[in-house]
Amino acid sequence: MTRIAFVGLGNMGGPMAANLVKAGHQVSGFDLSEASVKVAVEAGVRGTSALSDAVRDAECVITMLPKGQHVIAVWRDLTTLLAEDTLVIDCSTIDVESARNAHKLAEVMNCISLDAPVSGGTGGAAAGTLTFMVGGSEKAFALGRPILEAMGKKIVHCGAAGAGQAAKICNNMILGISMIGVCEAFGLAEKLGLSHQALFDVASTSSGQCWSLTTYCPVPGPVPTSPANNDYKPGFAAALMLKDLTLSQEASKQSGAATPLGAHAASLYEEFEKAGHGGDDFSAIIHMLREKAGG
Ligand code: NAD
C-alpha cells in the first residue's frame, strides 16, 4: 500500500484514481472542480479542498491535468509542500519542454519524477488497461512501475526525462495522419462505386491495415464498435487530436524534424474544430473531407 495524492480528477484522472483505490492504495484527491472530487469520493478517494491537504504525508503524487501550464503551476506549488524523495508522476499529455521543466522542478525538491502519459482513452482508464509511456531515470521507473500497473496493462520505459511525452506525440501524429488517410480512401472508394465493406475487407487484411481502420473505422458498418456507429460521439474527441498534433508540430519546429504530413493533419483538424466539431470523434473528419469533394 502506498499513500498517493491524485491531482486532476477529470474524465481520465477520476477512474485512474478509482483503480488505485481498488488496488489497495490509500488515495487522497484534489481537483478545482468540486463535482469531480465528489465522484472520486464515491469511488473511495479521500476528497480534499486544497492541494496542500491532498499531498500531506503522500509518498507519491500523480497529476492528470489538461495542459503543460497547469502541470507546471501545480508542480511549482508542490515545491514547498513535498518531503524529499517523494515520487512525482505526471500522466497528462503535455509538450516535451514543459515535461522536462517539470522534471527540473522535481530536482529542486529533491524528489523523484516521471513523465507518464497514457493512451487508451476514458475506456482504458476505467478498465485499468491504459498504456503508459514513461520518461525518467531507471530508479524512478522501478519505483513508479508497480503504481502504474494498478492503472494500466502496458508500461513502457521510453528513456530519460521527457521521453514518455515524446513517444506519445509521435504515436498520436501517426494516428492523426492515418485517420485522414483512411477517410480519404473511403471517400475515393465512394466516388469509384466500391462498397465500404469491400474496401474494409481488403484493406484490413492488406498493407493499408492500421488502427484507424480496424478499430475506429470512420464509416458505419464494418467495425460495429467504432464511433461512426454511435453518431460519431467520442471515443477520442477531435479537439484532443488537434491538441496532440499541435504538440507534435511544436516539437518538430523545436527539434528541426521534417513532418509535412503532420503539419497538414494539424491544419485539417484545426479547420474541423473551427467549424464547431471539436467535440465529435476525430473519425468524423470524414464528413469535412466529403464536403471538400462537393458532397
Ligand atoms: P479533464 O478536463 O476531464 O480533466 C482535467 C481535470 O483537471 C479537470 O477536472 C480540472 O478541473 C482539473 N484541473 C485543472 N487545473 C487544476 C489544478 N490547478 N488543480 C487541480 N485540478 C485541476 O481532462 P481529461 O480528459 O481527464 O484529460 C487529462 C489529460 O489526459 C489531458 O492532458 C489529456 O490530453 C490527456 N488524455 C486524455 C484522454 C481522453 O481520452 N480524455 C486520453 C489520453 C490522454
Image: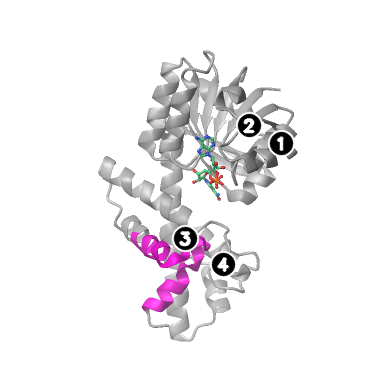
SS of the residue under disc 4: loop
Provide the residue designation for mark 4.
Answer: 232
What residue is disc 3 on? 278
Of badges 4 and 1, the one in the foreground is 1
Image location (x, y in percent) of residue 246: 37, 50
The mark nearer the N terminus, 2 or 4, is 2
Q: Identity of the amino acid at label 1?
A: Val
Q: Nearer the viewer, residue 205 or 189?
A: 189
Of the 4 image quadrants, the one containing the C terminus is bottom left
Closer to viewer: mark 3 or mark 1: 1
Q: CA distance from mark 2 to mark 1?
A: 8 Å
**Which is closer to the viewer, label 2 or label 4?**
2
Q: Rounded to the nearest whole Å, what is the CA distance between mark 4 and mark 1?
A: 31 Å
- Measured along the vertical axis of the image, is residue 259 above or below residue 197? above
Seen from the viewer's position, the closer of residues 279 and 255 is 279
Q: Which of labels 4 and 3 is toward the front?
A: 3
User: At x 41% / y 33%, what residue is drawn?
Assistant: 99
Q: Main secondary structure of the magenta part?
A: helix
Residue 156 visible: yes
* Amino acid residing under circle 4: Tyr
- As drawn, 9 above or below 197: above
Q: Amino acid at mark 3?
A: Gly
What label does residue 29 carry, if any?
Answer: 2
Residue at numbered disc 1: 41
**Mark 4 vs ligand 1: CB under 8 Å?**
no
Tell me how far mark 3 sits from mark 2, CA to CA.
29 Å
- In primary-sequence order, the first of circles 2 and 1 is 2
Which span of residues is magenta-colored? 267-292
Q: Nearer the viewer, residue 230 or 77?
A: 77
Q: Are marks 2 and 1 in contact (CB under 8 Å)?
A: yes
